[in-house]
Image: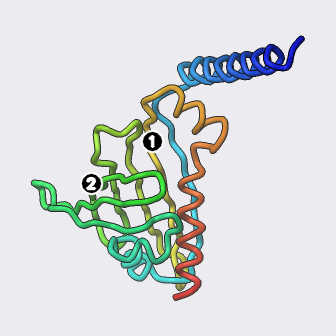
């Protein structure tokens, strides 16, 4: 087999393998549910009010959340709930406060219907001794099958919650 034919055969095999991999990922993603729930917790040596201040200081998020370049405040919802847009290495996402009961319960939601994902994050602060326990629950939705497969099999649905809690633990330890 000549050099060109061999190169073309290898290239065709690589293209076929990639196409088969994408087809398998799409098929796997179609079998996964659109919705998922991920939860994580953190014991903090800070009172709920102090943690609440960090959770709600939207303008300061880029100072402690890796990968977040900047935050843009947006006009509040018709109900007066805060809204903001976060810019990071994968684009931007618009969020809004859905429910707020300071300093114990905060629910934020993705407010951008054009994204391939959506959902809410519920933050519950429970007093514990001199500090508190924070529980974060993500009720996520991944609309596109390929993204569902990647989220489920490669990154894990709970990865974002755990990355967030790690960054918050680091931020609270530095305070």
Badge 1 element: strand
Residue name at image x 40 percent, y 71 percent: 55
Identify the coloring. Answer: rainbow
Residue name at image x 53 percent, y 70 percent: 133
- The answer to whether the residues at label 1 and label 2 have Cβ atoms under 8 Å apart is no
Q: Residues within 10 Å of mark 2 (few under 14, many from 20)?
A: some
In this view of the protein, which residue sits in the foreground, 11 or 73? 11
| Place of residue 43 in the rendered image (x, y in percent of width and height, measured from the top left) | 59, 72
Q: Residue furthest right?
A: 1
Disc nearer the start of the sequence (1/2) = 2
Q: Is residue 142 above or below residue 54?
A: above
Residue name at image x 51 percent, y 83 percent: 46
| Place of residue 111 in the rendered image (x, y in percent of width and height, measured from the top left) | 28, 48
| Place of residue 118 in the rendered image (x, y in percent of width and height, measured from the top left) | 38, 41
Q: Quadrant of residue 72?
A: bottom left
Q: Quadrant of residue 161?
A: bottom right
Q: Report the residue marked by disc 2.
A: 98
Q: Is residue 107 toward the left or the right of residue 147 in the image?
A: left
Q: Is residue 86 above or below residue 70?
A: above
Q: Quadrant of residue 7?
A: top right
Q: Is residue 49 toward the left or the right of residue 36 in the image?
A: left
- In the drawing, what numbered circle is on residue 89? none
Quarter of the rendering occupied by the N terminus: top right
Q: Residue furthest top?
A: 1
Badge 2 element: strand
Q: Residues within 10 Å of mark 1 (few under 14, many from 20)?
A: many
Q: Is residue 163 toward the left or the right of residue 89 in the image?
A: right
The CA distance from mark 1 to mark 2 is 15 Å
Residue name at image x 30 percent, y 38 percent: 114
- In the drawing, what numbered circle is on residue 140? 1
In this view of the protein, which residue sits in the foreground, 123 or 164? 164
Q: Residue furthest left?
A: 78
């Amino acid at each position: 087999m000549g050099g060109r034919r061999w190169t073309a055969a290898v290239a065709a095999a690589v293209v076929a393998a990639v196409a088969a991999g994408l087809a398998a990922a799409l098929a796997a993603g179609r079998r996964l549910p659109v919705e998922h729930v991920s939860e994580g917790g953190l014991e903090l040596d800070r009172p709920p009010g102090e943690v609440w201040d960090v959770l709600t200081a939207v303008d300061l998020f880029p100072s402690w959340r890796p990968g977040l370049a900047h935050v843009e405040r947006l006009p509040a919802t018709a109900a007066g709930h805060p809204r903001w847009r976060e810019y990071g290495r994968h684009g931007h996402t618009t969020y809004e406060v859905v429910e707020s009961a300071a300093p114990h319960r905060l629910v934020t939601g993705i407010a951008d219907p054009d994204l391939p994902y959506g959902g809410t994050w519920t933050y519950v602060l429970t007093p514990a001794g001199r500090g508190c326990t924070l529980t974060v629950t993500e009720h996520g939705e991944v609309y596109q099958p390929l993204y569902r497969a990647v989220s489920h099999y490669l990154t894990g649905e709970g990865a974002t919650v755990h990355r967030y809690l790690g960054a918050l633990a680091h931020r609270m330890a530095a305070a």
